[in-house]
Amino acid sequence: MTDSAFPPRPALKPDEIRSIIIGLMMAMLLAALDQTIVATAMPTIGRELGDAENLPWIVTAYLLASTAVTPLYGKFSDIHGRRIALLIAIILFIIGSLACALAPTMVALALARGVQGLGGGGLISLAQTILGDILSPRERARYQVFIASVFALSSLAGPLLGGFFAEHFHWSLIFWINLPIGLAAFLMTNGKLRLLPRHERRHSIDFLGAAILVVATVSLLLALSWGGIRYPWGSPRVLTLLGLSIVAWAGFVVRLRMAREPLIPLAVLGDQVVATGTLAACFAMGTFIGLTIYVPIYLEGVLGLTASQSGIALVPLMIGTVAGATISGRSMMYFTHYKRLPLLGMVISVVTCAVLALAAPALPLAALEVMLLLISLGLGTILPLATIAIQNAVAHHQLGTATATMNFFRSLGGALIVAVFGTIVIGGGGVKAIGIGNSSPLAAADLAQLSRTFQVVFAAADISLILALLWLALMQQRPLRGQAKTSEKAGEPLPIMIE
């Protein structure tokens, strides 16, 4: 793909670019904070609503809804513009957050989380797409510090606030807090995005393809969430869901080939960088979300920490991912072979996670914290690399679709891995761990069983990291647009040299 395939960008002033980015940061903060603040409050929510067995649906319902609508946001924004698509996402997220805060039962909370996910599915994806509209890939790496600051804030504040609210106030505050943030995001983006250049083309949305995709995704996630917990794996319900998912996925492939304008264009899916980069991001993000959700159960159930303490203990996992993403994104400005650092980081993550799976029951908290930090540092290096490389590989009018496709499979990977982790944890004593109070520790036999269960969880996480490393290694390394060979000036870093 050459620069000539892309329309010239309007000459936005630096202060206009900063204004747009600040508005996007508010929108991204909504989704990023939601990913981190819920985790440490989950055990408390399970106890207070008296339904720990269905607790994974708090996460699964959100991921399921957000996953299903992400491709629609990308296509819709390519047709009607980014601003209206992002405002719709923010409004749906606010409505869902209000419903979550008022939910009286686990079923109501799961349904409300689904509504919240309908909005959340567009927040980060659209923000990344808009950055692609106004910045070249190399410039995007330069502004990575702004985006990383959002995830750094959510990574630090989310676990702490979630644990603090759940332990000292009420768990519903983790959703009430979204209302003022959402309102600020709406007001800021509504004005700032009027400055945005427009690249949309008049196309149609493949609603039939979207419906088939929703059926394929929902049936698969239901099968993984219910199998081995609510129903045996060989039960008619689970087998029917798996069969329906297989048929629906096959139908979606046929639809992609037959539709005049498929939901995900084959030209996008067939690109080597898009395919491999998406799969690498899928397994990396899925592992991160899975660990974020279930490590607090390990911290509270096995190590006996309170909700607030587990929030503090989760910070290394969060901040390591942000640090890795920041280092990787910034390094793309200066190195031709920009894959080398993420490859090294992922090797470290794989080795560390393997050690954790073998030694978890014998590890003190300090050693566990170091290992979580090392795992997340390497894992974080994939995320900006995949996004920038994929956006660099497609035509500008397909930017929204390509970014949404990547985020769809990232969300799908997260939903699948969370479902798998949930099956392992709930089936291995996790319900007892969630149901205990701070003054009622697990019996020794239950504690040993839960420790062994989490060894399986960490082993599953390591397999996922290995797959992420494999797809990253296979991804082609194409020169980034916006890079040029320039003369070296005193005191000025030399940009990437393109052969």
Image (cartoon, helix red, strand yellow):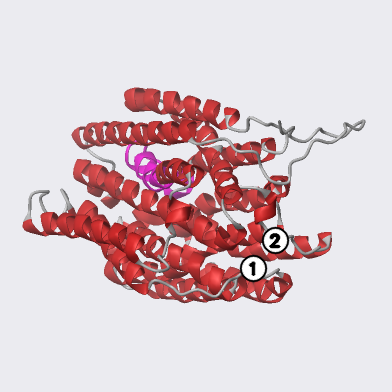
- Image location of residue 237, percent across then percent down: 11, 59
Q: CA distance from mark 1 to mark 2?
A: 8 Å
In depth, the one of 495 and 148 nearer the eye is: 495
Frontmost residue, 311 versus 417 = 417
Dot 1 and dot 2 residues touching (CB under 8 Å)? yes
Residue 303 colored magenta?
yes
Q: Is residue 333 left or right of residue 91?
A: right
The residue segment tinted magenta is 288-311
Residue sitting at x 38%, y 34%:
467
Instruction: Residue 408: give x, y in percent of width and height.
Output: 43, 56
Which one is in front, 368 or 126?
126
Secondary structure mostly seen in the magenta stretch? helix
Q: Which residue is mark 1?
A: 199
Reply above or below: 103 against 356: below
Q: Amino acid at mark 1?
A: His
Place of residue 420 in the rendered image (x, y in percent of width and height, measured from the top left) = 27, 45
Q: In terms of image quadrants, where is residue 448?
A: top left
Q: Is residue 301 left or right of residue 265?
A: left
User: At which x and y percent is residue 243?
Assistant: 15, 56
What residue appears at the point 42 percent right and 43 percent down from the top-left corner? 279
Does residue 222 appear in the picture of this structure? no
Q: Which residue is mark 2?
A: 7
Give the mark nearest the N terminus, 1 or 2. Answer: 2
